[in-house]
Image: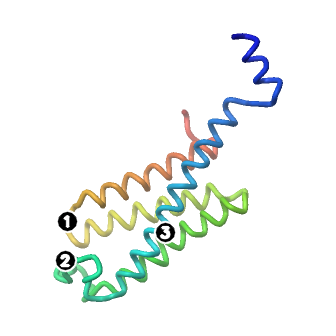
């Protein structure tokens, strides 16, 4: 067993580096998912009557919006856009990739919290996206070396 471990070290394998690469790939997959889903959903929401998602416009009665057009644009630009930028930084292997993934995670969490406050309801899908945003933030902090795991 010692021989196998020393062989792994001789070949240049580093357990921490491998773990970080796995976490990096998982983070990238989550960022891509949010970038794609927010951009597509936001674009489809601009069909202002909500029929694409079978959501009645009446859900917006507690907001300042009369239809889904402006929320759709905001979702596409802010949530989708920030995560598209983060994904581009990942692909370019840019040093600020984790800063952009943090930004995308924070924007996603804020979007969901504001959505819950404005429409005054809670769904399982909001919880999924809220947890995804939190997961993106935690993974980004871990990979930046700012976490204690």
Real-space Cα separation, disc 1 to disc 3, in angstroms? 24 Å
* Residue 136, horizontal then vertical, whole percent: 49, 52
Horizontally, residue 41 falls left or right of residue 102, namely left
Towards the viewer: 88 or 54: 54
Q: Say which residue appears at 69% left-offset and 11% top-offset.
A: 1
Q: Residues within 10 Å of mark 3 (few under 14, many from 20)?
A: some
Secondary structure under tag 1 reads: loop
Q: Say which residue appears at 53% left-offset and 73% top-offset.
A: 81
Real-space Cα separation, disc 2 to disc 1, in angstroms? 9 Å
Task: Report which residue position mark 3 lands on.
Answer: 36
Asked whether disc 3 touches disc 2, contact meaning CB atoms under 8 Å apart, the reply is: no
Secondary structure under tag 2 reads: helix
Real-space Cα separation, disc 3 to disc 2, in angstroms? 24 Å
Horizontally, residue 123 falls left or right of residue 30, namely left
Q: Which mark is residue 30?
A: none
Q: Which mark is residue 59?
A: 2
Dot 2 or dot 1, earlier in sequence: 2
Secondary structure under tag 3 reads: helix
Q: Say which residue appears at 48% left-offset and 61% top-offset.
A: 33
Asked whether disc 2 touches disc 1, contact meaning CB atoms under 8 Å apart, the reply is: yes
């Amino acid at each position: 067993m010692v021989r196998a471990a020393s062989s792994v070290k001789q070949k240049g394998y580093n357990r921490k580096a491998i773990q970080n690469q796995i976490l990096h790939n998982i983070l990238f997959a989550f960022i891509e998912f949010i970038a794609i889903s927010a951009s597509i959903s936001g674009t489809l929401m601009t069909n202002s009557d909500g029929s694409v998602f079978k959501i009645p416009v009446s859900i917006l009665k507690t907001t300042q919006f009369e239809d889904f057009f402006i929320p759709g644009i905001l979702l596409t630009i802010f949530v989708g856009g920030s995560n598209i930028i983060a994904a581009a930084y990942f692909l370019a292997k840019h040093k600020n990739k984790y800063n952009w993934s943090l930004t995308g995670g924070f924007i996603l969490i804020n979007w969901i919290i504001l959505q819950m406050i404005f429409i005054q309801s809670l769904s399982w899908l909001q919880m999924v996206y809220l947890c995804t945003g939190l997961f993106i933030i935690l993974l980004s902090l871990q990979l930046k070396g700012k976490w204690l795991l």
